[in-house]
Image (cartoon, rainbow, N blue to C red):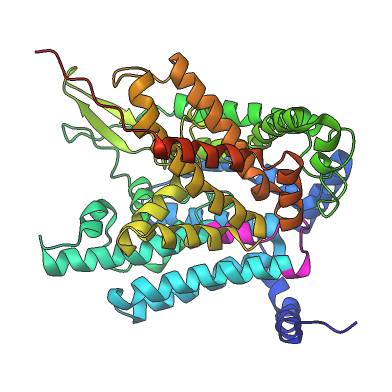
Amino acid sequence: ETSLFPAIDYLIGAAYSLRPFIEPTVCLVPSALKAQIASIAELVGMDVETVAMVLGMFMCYPCGLIQSMLPFGRVKHLFSFLLGAFLLQFVLGVQWIHHLISTLACYLCFTLLPPSVNKYVVPSIAIGYCIVGHVHRQYINYMGWDLDFTGAQMVLTIKLYAMAWNLYDGHLIAQAGDKLPRATKKCSQFAISECPPLLNYLGYTFCFSNVLAGPAFEYSTYLAAAEGTYFVDKDGKRKTPSRLYPVFWPLLQSLLCLAVFVSICPQFPLMNSTSPKLRPPPLEGPTSIYELGALKGLAFLFVSLGLNRSKYYFAWKNAQGASNTWYCGFEGYAEEPAKDAAIERWEHSNNVDIFRCETASCAQMGTKFWNKKTALWLNRYVYARTDGSLTMTYFMSAFWHGFYPGYYLFFLSLPLLTMCERLGRAKISPLLSSPGDGRFTPYGCTTIILTQLLLAYCSVPFIFLSLEWSLEFWRGIYYSGHVAMLAFVGVCTVMPKPKLKKKEE
């Protein structure tokens, strides 16, 4: 059989030929431990990589406690780097080398090139490496599922991309003083005045508590935790906050989400349990939309998608608790004038607000509290740096996720939903609600239900990935979501804008 892409086959073959030279670098994981993980995976009926991933994430908790007891400075940076490298080798094997190569390549740029050049070069290298990983994965195993380096590479991409702009902002602040671009002023608290030492840099890029699943917080956040500068209250005294609640509450949430995903989610499958390349249950079998009908099919989808999100909630909440074990989620002390006291803030490691996501009354709110650190990266370093270009922001988000058609069907559907929400706020909300009303009024609950249903409808391609399967599902429920949104836009467009009631004097 002749390949359609001989050049790609040649490059992949050349890269794979280097494996014998790379295998000796996987030196941090004992062979006995690998064999034990393989035995556990066989016992529970899961693949080795997934078992290693879950165990690696829980391993971060005791390691985080050790990190918190180490001296501030170089020792913490070294421990963070070595443990991060161990986790990558433990989960990914030889593929850990991609993390090291892209990290060192960007550091070389940081040391040799000026910040005004690096703000373009480093992001290009980072997102380019991520894109190559996605293309490789789709090329060798299209529509398949395997745990490879692309997940960790996506987290690393955010770190490197942001750091390039942080260094540029630091350069501008030192040179320009008060005459700064708006985006630089907005991100001035994250600015870096000079290229960090290699050990600090490796400790950040390999940071063990977020190297596998994120969230990718700023370099300044990592540095403050490693150096201990956040532990100063409003009176200038060093004070270590209690981490009991910030650690155990996210850990409990992650365990509950893991239990839901393992025990309940299989009862409402979105993808074929034997192989993701086979037609998914919503298109075939007793739970298909053709057997259930459009309305029941949409209800099945809504429940299934909600349960499917539990795996992301598990990963992010687990990482949040692990980061908080060594105070990397600690944001510092905020003054509370009413009580003349300082309150603790723990938002740096928080990547999702589950309740607000599940009760979002608009798509903007849903995306704001879902994968929050990625949304902040897109806002600070893509949207704000391209003069507010939504097109560039959507394309960067799409490229960062990969190149399956389903991603693009999802992102192309969101603007229509956003248009509905804007028209609804302008034409419908003034008639049925008042500015002081809460979210859970009858009208507010209606918007929550409609938003969740439409987000579930639009999210189908994001899960199916395939263009054929996504369109087939939408066709099975008569493109009801798109029809409803277009009809709403048409009705609201011809509606007169309601007059605001004048306030009584």
In the rendered image, residue 50, in percent from the top left (x then y), is placed at 74, 48
Q: Compared with residue 79, is residue 493 higher up or lower down, i.e. above or below?
A: above
Residue bounds of the magenta highlight: 139-154
* Residue at image location 46% in from the left, 63% down from the top: 202
Is residue 140 one of those drawn in magenta? yes
In the rendered image, residue 167, in percent from the top left (x then y), is placed at 30, 66
Q: Quadrant of the C terminus?
A: top left
Q: Exactly how many numbered labels are in the figure?
A: 0
* Residue at image location 57% in from the left, 61% down from the top: 153
Q: Quadrant of the N terminus?
A: bottom right
In the rendered image, residue 138, in percent from the top left (x then y), is placed at 72, 65
Is 204 displayed left or right of 4 in the figure? left
Q: Compared with residue 351, is residue 136 higher up or lower down, i.e. above or below?
A: below
For the question of whether residue 459 can be seen, the reply is yes
In the rendered image, residue 313, in percent from the top left (x then y), is placed at 59, 36
Q: Compared with residue 56, is residue 118 higher up or lower down, i.e. above or below?
A: below
399 and 82: which is toward the camera:
399
231 and 184: which is toward the camera:
184
Q: Quadrant of residue 11?
A: bottom right
Is 415 displayed left or right of 331 in the figure? right
For the question of whether residue 193 can be seen, the reply is no
291 and 126: which is toward the camera:
291
* Residue at image location 53% in from the left, 32% down from the top: 451
Q: Compared with residue 99, is residue 281 higher up or lower down, i.e. above or below?
A: above
